[in-house]
Amino acid sequence: MKRIALIIALVCTFVTLFSMASSAIELPLRVVVNGSKLEFPDEQPFIDENGRTQTPARFIGEALGATVTWDGNEKKAIFSLAGTTLAIYIGKKEYDVNGIKKQMDTEALLLGGRTFVPARYVAEALGATVDWDASIRTVYIITKGKPTPTPPAQGGTVKYYDGVAFNDVTDVDAYGRITVEKSKEFLLNFTKYLSFVKENGKYYIVCDYPEKPEGYEWNLVVRIYYKNGSSDWYTPITRITEYQIPREGSFKKEAIGISNVNNIRSFSISISLNHPKTDNTGLLDILFYPDGSKKRCEFVPESGLYKNESYTNTFDFNKMFQWK
């Protein structure tokens, strides 16, 4: 009997872990040119069926310093830079560099009113170097004559925390806080380990805190707002035992104030990774209305020098919020 019970326990553990992992957000695809992240106002870059990063032609071209024009008759995008002319044709693997025909393993596309071109072929044809970091889904492009950006401090030790690479020198700002870009990675990764589940008629908040760099601490706040105007706040700092949650390890907290989920108006969650003395560079803000009327998932930087970054379109709210 003990052996059967052990097998059942292991199966239940696997199912729980799988369920939690399925609520992860995929890291957004980023294009960084000479150390600066490109912003795309409407259509976003994506990886095509050939494994190539497709980007809106005008934005990638102008970021590389090129003049970009469109030839509607031949359906081609033309990039001109310092004596180099590149022509990429919609729907064709053939392209021209200064009139010389070449081949690529994918093709340009027309989507959402934008011309999409493969970033690597455009950048390299214009003399830039390209690197791809699959772990953080980022394309790094360095244009000709531009040295690879170096961090203000060299060295450091790289360690992995549940899949997130962290350098204790280059991923830390002058105040000891984890940098904005690295904070985004840690916070998005956190969402794999947080879920709202229902078991035997009871409602639980379940979290298995992911690994973090030494000297930092997680801060998770879960707010549940009800239609009658009341609310429950689950935080590490409250003195009310029923609403207190830990900062590390794992927990399965029963939401004792809930008898009927139809009484819930909304969920509001904030997640941050804090330095004990200088706080953080930003937090992940999640808002969800069970009726589907509102939802939001975005990184909110502490400094106004940075822009909010939204992940609403890639976040699977229904997998995180499983209370029915």
Image (spheres, grey):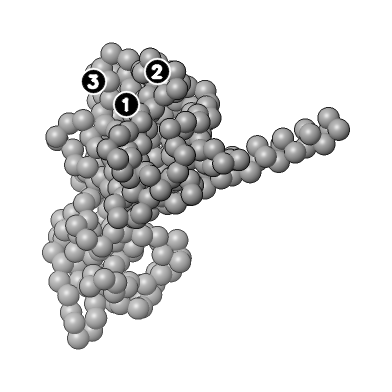
The quadrant in which residue 263 appears is: top left
Q: Residue furthest bottom?
A: 73
The quadrant in which residue 69 appears is: bottom left
Whether residues under marks 2 and 3 lie with C-beta atoms below 8 angstroms apart, the answer is: no
Q: Is residue 43 visible?
A: yes
Q: How far separated are the C-alphas under marks 2 and 1?
A: 31 Å
Q: Amino acid at mark 3?
A: Ala
Determine whether the residue tagged by mark 2 lies in a helix, strand or loop.
loop
Q: How far separated are the C-alphas under marks 2 and 3?
A: 36 Å
Q: Nearer the viewer, residue 32 or 5?
A: 5
Quarter of the image where the N terminus is located: top right
Q: Nearer the viewer, residue 256 or 162?
A: 256
Pointer 1: what residue? 178
Q: Which numbered disc flags the more N-terminal residue, 2 or 1?
A: 1
Q: Amino acid at mark 1?
A: Ile
User: Is 267 rendered above or below residue 251?
Assistant: below
Q: Which label was assigned to residue 174? A: 3
- Label 2 crowd (10 A; few <14 / some 14-19 / many >=20): few
Q: Residue at x 18, y 38 (%)?
A: 306
Q: Nearer the viewer, residue 159 or 260?
A: 260
Pointer 2: what residue? 240
